[in-house]
Amino acid sequence: MKAVFSLFLDIIFPCSCVSCGDLVPSYRNYLCGRCQSQLKVAHNSCQICSGLLYNGRCLICSDRKFYPSKNISLFNYCDVSRAAVHSLKFEGIRGVHRVFIPYICERIGDFDRKIDIVASVPMNRDKYIKRGYNQSELLALGVSRKTGIEYAGILKERKNSAQQRSLNYSERFINVIDRYETVNNNKFRNKVILLIDDVFTTGATVNECSRKLILSGASRVFSITVVRSDLKKLENV
């Protein structure tokens, strides 16, 4: 019955691939098989933060304290991943997030500790109302459902925070200082947390969220980010 209903919806409300524009069935989650196969796995990655290495050196975490024990970024910021993330964040096509859930779940086993709680980078109320959802929360909830690991809302973003995408490299680190705060501390004290976000550029966001969680009692924080953007492309993220 579910398959018949999906077919009916595809006929009445056909879906288009967010990358190439071809018609796709709804179960493809707005990304056709050809485009999904063109997602570029992040390579030449730092073993700690997944940042892109330049002459063997990581420009993200080599000169600063990096609070996640390990971050894994899944894909490079290519044409397909850019289209998928942009449609999810700015065009209201929330179903795209389901494309990435299996990829995230596959990498959880790469961490050396059992994950107790799945969490997401938060979004303040004003931005949430404007967008209608938090894309990082959608990803984290999907991972929770697929793995059975509990999801918990343990972070919140303060009001009137400047958007990271409008800032340069140095400003991003300054902008996130005390931008987030923890909630429900008893929920995660002495627990291992998996923090999920959509884009990793400077690592400032996951780093500050992880710092707050650790200072508030988390045993360890790991993170997975869907897309890694080159530092040279800050203006596009």
Image (cartoon, rainbow, N blue to C red):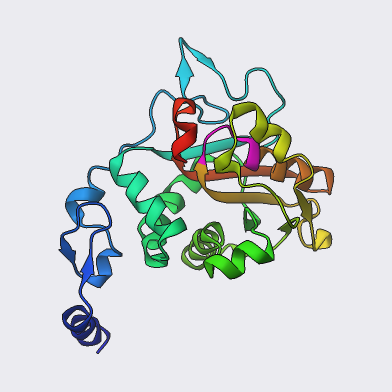
Residue 202 falls within the magenta-colored stretch:
yes
**Above or below, comparing residue 169 to residue 134 in the picture:** above
Residue at 20% x, 52% y is 20
Residue 28 shows up from this direction: yes
Residue name at image x 21 percent, y 57 percent: 32
Is 196 displayed left or right of 37 in the figure? right
Residue 66, x across and y down, in percent: 68, 30
The residues colored magenta run 200-205
Q: Residue at 82% of width from left, 59% of height from top?
A: 185
Q: Residue at x 76, y 39 (%)?
A: 177
* 118 relative to 31 in the view: left or right: right
Residue 40 to residue 89: above or below: above
Residue 174, percent from left and from top: 73, 34
Res. 99 image quadrant: bottom left
Q: Does the magenta stretch include residue 187?
A: no
Tell me residue 83's x, y (percent). 33, 49
Residue nearest the observer in this picture, 26 or 171: 171
